[in-house]
């Protein structure tokens, strides 16, 4: 596997990110002698597709593995699942010298990371990312969480992994809709921080034969996230920029009772927020139009799938809404984000329900 970069958070030790398809030997190679046992946490699909092979490789090297799994899907990223897996780890006698190996997309990674954060006050974990979304985003940066009935990711902890392995071969098995979810986040990274990456995505999108992006695009997204995490791993300022498209995106997920896939909601959210920004003079109209064209080329939606009235309650409940002011993180140019806003550190803009509604209706 190839080394992409080291993530260097201020609040934790640095850790490497590798990508490629020979994940099992790499996992064995970077296994530390002090990790005496492994808890391999996957959903049922990623356990079957990837977990068993990783388990075999660890066991062949004398590492005792407790394999744990749960049903795929957001509705299982819960305290209840966490407690069930933790009870199994306690029953099996795993102690502080154990290491969690989380295998899959953002859901097993968020859940496995949160278990590692709290098990015996914190043990090591390694992320093996098998979805595009996890590779360009969720596997990196130490955010871990579970959902509750009141909302997504409301309980969690910052707990960085010791290493991140991106299984690029796994993307060949990933359903198209999941690839598109990841592509939306890759476009977000490009819009925020790299005009050259944006151009590369435009060029690739126009002549692609599949929705699996080249490894270099994934690697560049990792570098962008690494830079943001190094500047603000505790999410008190600059990391807020990663919320571009997510304020409106979460409202769309709410307004469609979570029937809109996350990446689709973020795609539409980015277009609506870019339109709002163009109206306010914060971003050129051309940048918004290029964003929309790229999303269209990739078959991602750009128009709201529900009415503003249906989505609006989701804005009020958003974690980024403070005292009635709705914060949106928006680039200041295509591939550039400057701290010119009113939110913490200047990295997001204070907006109103009225502004969002006008941009929404213009895009509807
Ligand atoms: N921690 C963070 O910084 C961060 C950032 C972004 C998103 N997230 C979280 O990530 C989650 C979404 O992640 P996701 O989109 O990866 O979802 P996911 O983990 O549910 O994976 C999507 C689906 O693909 C299946 N799958 C995984 N890899 C596969 C493969 N290679 N081939 C075939 N099927 C495969 C899974 O079983 C699942 O059904 C959300 O809960 C979100 O909150 C976290």
Image (cartoon, rainbow, N blue to C red):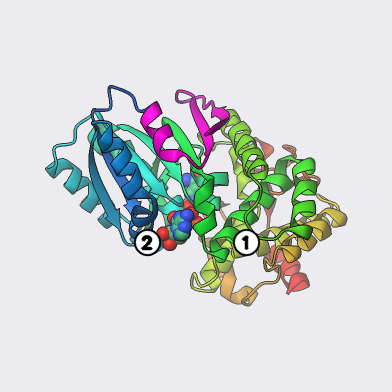
Q: Residue at x 37, y 44 (%)?
A: 102
Picture quadrant where residue 93 is located: top left
Left-right relation of 97 to 103: left
The magenta stretch is: 1-30
| Camera-side mark, 1 or 2 | 2
Q: Which residue is mark 1?
A: 248
Circle 1 — which element?
helix
Q: How many marks?
A: 2
- 205 sits to left or right of 92: right
Expressed as whole percent of the image width and height from the top left, the position of residue 224 reads 65, 37
Task: Name above or below for residue 97 compared with residue 136.
Answer: above
Q: Is residue 90 above or below residue 275?
A: above
Quadrant housing the C terminus: bottom right
Label 2 CB less than 8 angstroms from ligand 1: yes
Q: Residue furthest front?
A: 60
Q: Earlier in the sequence, mark 1 or mark 2?
A: 2
| Position in image of residue 202 (x %, y %) | 78, 53
Residue under label 2: 72
């Amino acid at each position: 596997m190839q080394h992409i970069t080291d993530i260097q958070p201020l609040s934790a030790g640095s850790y490497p990110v590798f990508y490629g398809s020979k994940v099992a030997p790499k996992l064995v190679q970077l296994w530390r002698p002090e990790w005496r046992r492994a808890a391999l946490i996957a959903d049922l699909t990623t356990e079957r597709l990837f977990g068993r092979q990783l388990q075999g490789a660890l066991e062949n090297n004398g590492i005792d593995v407790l394999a744990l799994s749960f049903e795929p899907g957001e509705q299982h990223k819960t305290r209840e699942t966490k407690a069930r897996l933790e009870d199994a780890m306690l029953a099996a006698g795993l102690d502080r010298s154990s290491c969690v190996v989380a295998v899959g997309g953002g859901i097993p990674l968020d859940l496995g990371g949160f278990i590692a954060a709290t098990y015996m006050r914190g043990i090591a974990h390694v992320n093996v990312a098998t979805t595009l979304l996890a590779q360009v985003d969720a596997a990196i940066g130490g955010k871990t969480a579970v959902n509750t009935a009141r909302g997504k990711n409301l309980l969690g902890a910052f707990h960085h992994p010791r290493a991140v392995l991106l299984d690029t071969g796994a993307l060949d098995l990933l359903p198209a809709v999941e690839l598109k979810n990841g592509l939306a986040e890759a476009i977000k990274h490009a819009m925020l921080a790299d005009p050259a990456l944006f151009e590369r995505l435009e060029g690739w999108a126009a002549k692609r034969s599949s929705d699996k992006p080249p490894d270099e695009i994934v690697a560049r997204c990792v570098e962008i996230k690494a830079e943001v995490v190094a500047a603000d791993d505790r999410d008190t300022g600059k990391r807020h920029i990663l919320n571009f498209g997510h304020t409106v995106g979460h409202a769309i997920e709410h307004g469609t009772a979570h029937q809109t896939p996350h990446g689709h909601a973020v795609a539409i959210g980015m277009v609506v927020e870019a339109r709002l920004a163009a109206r306010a003079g914060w971003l050129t109209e051309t940048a918004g139009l290029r964003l929309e064209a790229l999303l269209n080329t990739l078959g991602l939606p750009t128009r709201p799938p529900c009415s503003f009235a249906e989505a609006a309650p989701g804005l009020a409940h958003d974690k980024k809404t403070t005292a009635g002011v709705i914060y949106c993180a928006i680039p200041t140019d295509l591939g550039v984000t400057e701290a010119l806003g009113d939110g913490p550190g200047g990295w997001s803009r204070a907006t109103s329900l009225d502004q969002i509604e006008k941009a929404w209706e213009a895009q509807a």
